[in-house]
Amino acid sequence: MGRKKSNNKTIFIIIHIIILVIICILIFANIFVYTKNKEYINTNIHISQEIAKKEIIFSNNKKEIDNLNSEINKINDLNNSINKEKEDYYSNIRLLEDKILKGESNQKIAYITIDDGPYQYTNQFLDILKKYNAPATFFVLLKPNRINEYKRMVNEGHTIANHTASHNLKKTGIYSSSNAFISDVNLLNNWLEKNVGVSTTLFRFPGGSPTAGRFKLDIANTLKEKGYNYVDWNVIVGDGSDALIKQKRPYEWVKDQIKGKDIAVILMHDYCLETLQDLPKILQYLKDNGYLILPLTNKSIMVN
């Protein structure tokens, strides 16, 4: 009887231990599950917060992009408007030229064309042109170290035109073949587009169109297919050679050469100190004698 009681007591203890172990397991399991759930919840909260932050950033970026696109559209509209006004302006110049040649207008036009630059005097030329409110046409070469001068020409309303990249008049240079000349023109135009942001459809043969010899027509016709036209000149200032500039001053050359010309294309160079010195007198003389100083355009009657 005593042994039976002892066994029952032992079984009772074992059962209680098992129950206690089960309870402990359940408690630890609940704690583990709770911990994991809490981590999961915290992770989800963190993810939700990050998503919310990303959505705010995305929303702000979208607004910035929308604002930027709006500004770009405004700039494009403005450029289109400017280009339209420029086209109208150039067309009106051509109409005026027609009236002058038909004797229907007493107005006279002078085109200041400045070749071979930019040079060390270019900024001083630009200063004087600005003072006299005289737009010019610069037939430029490729000179990467003068990029500020190119940009100033554009910013101050002058026309940039193509005078080939190299102005190489040697036998192996631009007049060795039509392709050599056209490649030089393309080289300069591509550089101007990339570095100055302008493209031109007006060019001048270095030395004048007769210098191209037997290649002249082929060059002119090939470039015309690409939208280019060329122009020579009918007035010089004598700075194209030492012999001419020694004969008389640039101002005197203009006075003598411009007589009887209602539309004058004046050739000068911004490497010549004498021309720089006489430029104010030349511009004043043109204004005093009824000449309207304009930039050359592809539409001009003087352009071939």
Image (cartoon, rainbow, N blue to C red):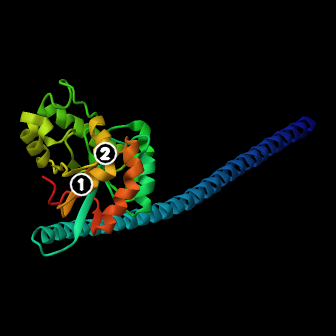
Q: Say left or right for 216 vs 247.
A: left
Q: Where, by quadrant of the figure, is residue 95 drawn?
A: bottom left
Label 1 – label 2 distance at C-alpha = 11 Å
Q: Quadrant of residue 111?
A: bottom left
Please state if 280 lies on the left or on the right of 289 as rendered.
Answer: right
Look at mark 2 in the image and give the residue it sits on: 248
Q: Residue at x 23, y 35 (%)?
A: 184
Q: Is residue 213 left or right of residue 112?
A: left
Where is the N terminus found, in terms of image quarters? top right
Element under label 1? helix
Q: Most extreme residue toward the top, as rendered?
A: 172
Kind of residue sitting beneath label 2: Lys
* Image position, residue 171 (x, y; %): 17, 24
Front position in the image: 301 or 221:
301
**Secondary structure category for the residue under label 2:** loop
| Residue found at the far right of this picture | 2
Which of the pair 297/256 is nearer the observer? 256
Residue at position x 82%, y 41% from top?
17
Position in image of residue 236 (x %, y %): 24, 48
Visible in this render: residue 214?
Answer: yes
- For residue 154, the mark is none
**Which comes sooner in the sequence, label 1 or label 2?**
2
Residues at marks 1 and 2 touching, judged by CB atoms closer than 8 Å: yes
**Residue 249's x, y, as percent?**
33, 47
Where does the image place residue 154, in percent across and percent down from the top left?
37, 54
Work out whether 143 lies above or below 74: above
Front-most of residues 160 and 98: 98
Task: Quickly name the residue at label 1.
Answer: 256
